[in-house]
Amino acid sequence: MSAFPQFSLDPEQAARRDRLRDLAETRLRPLAEKGEPGRVNRPLVEALGELGLLDGLFTAGALDLCLTRESLARGCTEAETAYALQGLGAYPVHAHGPAALRERWLPAAREGRAVAAFALSEPGAGSDAAALALRAEPEPGQAGTWRLTGEKSWISNAPEADFYTVFARTTPDAGARGVTAFLVPADRPGLTGTPLAMLSPHPIGTLAFDGVRVSTDDLLGEVDRGFGVAMATLNRFRPSVGAFAVGMAQAALDATLAHTAERDAFGGKLKDLQAVSHQVAEMATRTEAARLLVYAAAAAHDREEQGIAGRAAMAKLFATETAQYVVDTAVQLHGARALQHGHLLEHLYREVRAPRIYEGASEVQRAVIAKQLYATAPSPKETA
Ligand code: COS
């Protein structure tokens, strides 16, 4: 339980948050610890399904999604990541897929039997997503059929996922207006991949497409409208990346409160040193501010208010940057023990860095915020 009330959580939501955190610690963390870092942990994904945690992944409101991600992150970051990746990979199928694809993949994804992935980034197109170059070329003489050729990189759950939401270029030189989303099952001939060893322990890899055949049956949305599919998916999940960050910050704060209250130094407890207690107060204040921004953006999303993209960007930006600060300060206040392999803070220190980059780097979030500010700024006449 946080020392301060949560933004707009009613008693039922607060009870759910506590129950989820407890499940994460008692049921999911033991499974996460048995997994291999950097590889898909299928027993963990299956457990998320068996516990019913994936049920609301495509239908839950943004606030609910944030509550789940924050609670899971506080108890087990690997479970949180596995949960979020199922959402990111399968949400485009839920929101834009035809009935046949929805029936084939969504029950399996919800039950944790099929692992999903969202394949947008490429070696030459990260933040500038509209520059993606993976080619979807029409198959001569076969209307409604394309061959995919090219590469995707830093794709979470690749190459072990069972199906991929893949964004490919159907119209050359058309930027964001020439991208199409396809569902590509992992066993399509011509699709291969390689795991990447990264700083954080979550599964991630590259995908190589060597003339992979796709057809209109695999379309998620309309031809050349895939950039919108990608953006809508990111809009849905961005505030909840902030919730993941808040959960990590809270876990680091919890550990710091426990440690500084117990640890003897200079004839008292660490917390008796003002240099320590003021830092803890700062960590708590910034974490709470991040939480408020995240939940406010999510609630605005659920009320379908204007300006969601900018608010989601603010929440993601502020929460991920705050979590980095909080985890780093927690490491400092714990001293050398926090650097030891296997310590919670050593784990969080490796986990906390990536969310400042993925699903839109901090710089992209600032660009989104600024664009919206200028688009809605009052004209000089109005301010005169
Ligand atoms: N929501 C809905 N639509 C959006 C959108 C958003 N957040 N951002 C852009 N769009 C739409 C625009 O409305 C525009 O539509 P039209 O073509 O119909 O006019 C189209 O997308 C192109 O918009 P814009 O010209 O602003 O796109 P840019 O190429 O400048 O790129 C950013 C916009 C930088 C915001 C985008 O490329 C992005 O989000 N990059 C980060 C990608 C990312 O998160 N990667 C991580 C992958 S997941 S780990």
Image: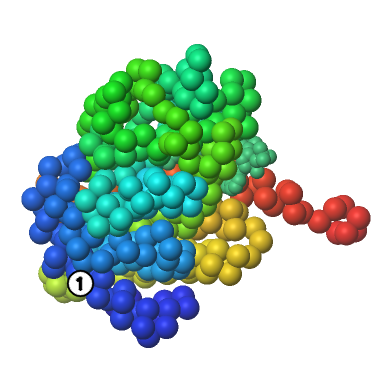
Quadrant of the image occupied by residue 333: bottom left
Q: Position of residue 382 (x, y in %)?
A: 88, 59
Residue occupied by mark 1: 22
Quadrant of the image occupied by residue 222: top right
Q: Is residue 242 above or below residue 96?
A: below
Q: Position of residue 339 (x, y in %)?
A: 17, 48
User: In the visual, does 248 lie left or right of 371?
Assistant: left
Element marked by disc 1: helix
**What coloring was used for the rendering?**
rainbow
Q: Quadrant of the N terminus?
A: bottom left
* Residue at x 25%, y 57% (from the top left corner): 111
- Viewer-proximal residue among 367 and 277: 367
Indicate the quadrant of ligand 1 in the picture.
Answer: top right
* Residue at x 38%, y 18% (from the top left corner): 211
Q: Position of residue 136 (x, y in %)?
A: 48, 23
In the rendered image, the residue lying farthest to the top is: 140
* Residue at x 22%, y 60% (from the top left corner): 48
- Viewer-proximal residue among 262 and 252: 252
Q: Position of residue 69 (x, y in %)?
A: 34, 61
Q: Is residue 61 above or below residue 6?
A: above
- Viewer-proximal residue among 43 and 346: 43
Specify few, some or many for label 1: CA neighbours under 10 Å numbering under 14, 14-19, or 20 or more.
some
Quadrant of the image occupied by residue 58: bottom left
Q: Is residue 149 above or below residue 250?
A: above
* Residue at x 55%, y 31% (from the top left corner): 179
